[in-house]
Image: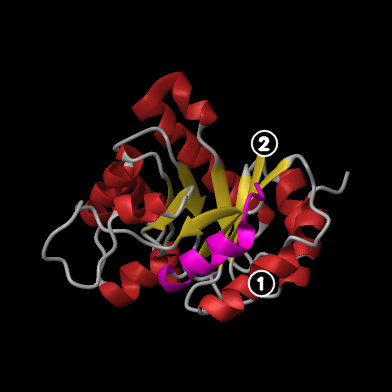
């Protein structure tokens, strides 16, 4: 099963989120792809209401805290996300690591807390351009990933920081190499179970390049940012991924 996950980032309050979901539900979607959308916390309830009993897209969050409750002003516990029927949650996105100082250790605690309540963590890892230029890519990704492997019930999203939002996607060759490296890290930790962990690619994915990633890299899916903001465009992207 392939995965396509939309990440709206800091876009769409409850009104626009509800409208997006209603519009997207009218799109003709491939049956052999798991489709999800990660929305801002403030819009989760509206998105859930617009979904109704529909099974697609899966509803996801963009972040969570590791505590169940307490004096953590502004944070959101996994149990709170669980009440809204949240299926998955992004953790460790490069924008949070860069702008909010999230560490590998914090990401690991979030992964464990989400898995404990049955919400699937989507662990984001990836290097900056400076780190790639210094040939530190594997070292950086291995450190980020290793700290997050508190459960095998997760997804991994390789998002090279230099490709996110740049309009310049990582080449399929680089994506394939990193997929293979990440799979080896997972195998060393989880053995045969590692084969069941989906590995996604994220970074300037659109309807023009998604099929190439799916058909040539062996990756298990994609994490889509800007190209997911319009429901019709995102529907086109989902259909493009399934082309034979």
Label 2 or label 1, whichever comes before in sequence order: 2
Q: Camera-side residue: 187 or 116?
A: 116
Q: Name the residue nearer the viewer: 114 or 244.
A: 114
67 left or right, relative to 71? right
185 on left or right of 240: left
Residue 159 point in image, percent of width and height: 50, 60
Q: Disc 2 versus disc 1: distance between alpha carbons?
A: 25 Å
> Mark 2 falls on what kind of element?
loop
Would you name the residue on which mark 2 appears? 1
Indicate the quadrant containing the N terminus: top left, top right, bottom left or bottom right.
Answer: top right
Residue 146 against residue 11 in the figure, above or below: above
Measured as percent of width and height from the top left, residue 146 is found at: 31, 42
Q: Is residue 215 magenta?
A: no
Q: Position of residue 125 (x, y in %)?
A: 42, 55
Relative side of 140 to 8, left or right: left
Which residue is the extreme one toward the right?
A: 244
Residue furthest top as drawn? 192
Magenta segment, which residues? Answer: 41-55
**Magenta stretch mostly in which secondary structure?**
helix
Q: Which mark is residue 20?
A: 1
């Amino acid at each position: 099963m392939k995965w396509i996950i939309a990440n709206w980032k800091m876009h769409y309050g409850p009104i626009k989120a509800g409208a997006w979901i209603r519009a997207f539900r009218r799109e003709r979607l491939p049956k052999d792809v798991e489709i999800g959308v990660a929305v801002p916390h403030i819009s989760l309830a509206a998105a859930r209401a617009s979904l109704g009993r529909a099974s697609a897209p899966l509803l996801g969050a963009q972040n969570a805290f590791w505590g169940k409750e307490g004096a953590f002003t502004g944070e959101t516990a996994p149990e709170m996300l669980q009440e809204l029927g949240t299926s998955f949650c992004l953790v460790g996105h490069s924008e949070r690591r860069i702008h909010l100082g999230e560490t590998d250790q914090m990401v690991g605690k979030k992964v464990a807390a989400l898995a404990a309540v049955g919400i699937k963590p989507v662990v984001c890892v990836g290097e900056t351009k400076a780190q790639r230029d210094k040939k530190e890519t594997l070292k950086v990704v291995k450190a980020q990933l290793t700290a997050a492997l508190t459960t095998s019930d997760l997804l991994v999203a390789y998002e090279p920081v230099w490709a996110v939002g740049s309009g310049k996607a990582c080449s399929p060759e680089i994506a394939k190499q990193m997929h293979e490296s990440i799979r080896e890290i997972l195998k060393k930790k989880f053995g045969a179970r590692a084969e069941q962990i989906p590995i996604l690619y994220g970074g300037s994915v659109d309807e023009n390049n998604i099929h190439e990633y799916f058909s040539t890299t062996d990756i298990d899916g994609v994490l889509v940012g800007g190209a997911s903001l319009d429901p019709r465009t995102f529907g086109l992207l989902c259909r493009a991924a399934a082309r034979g």
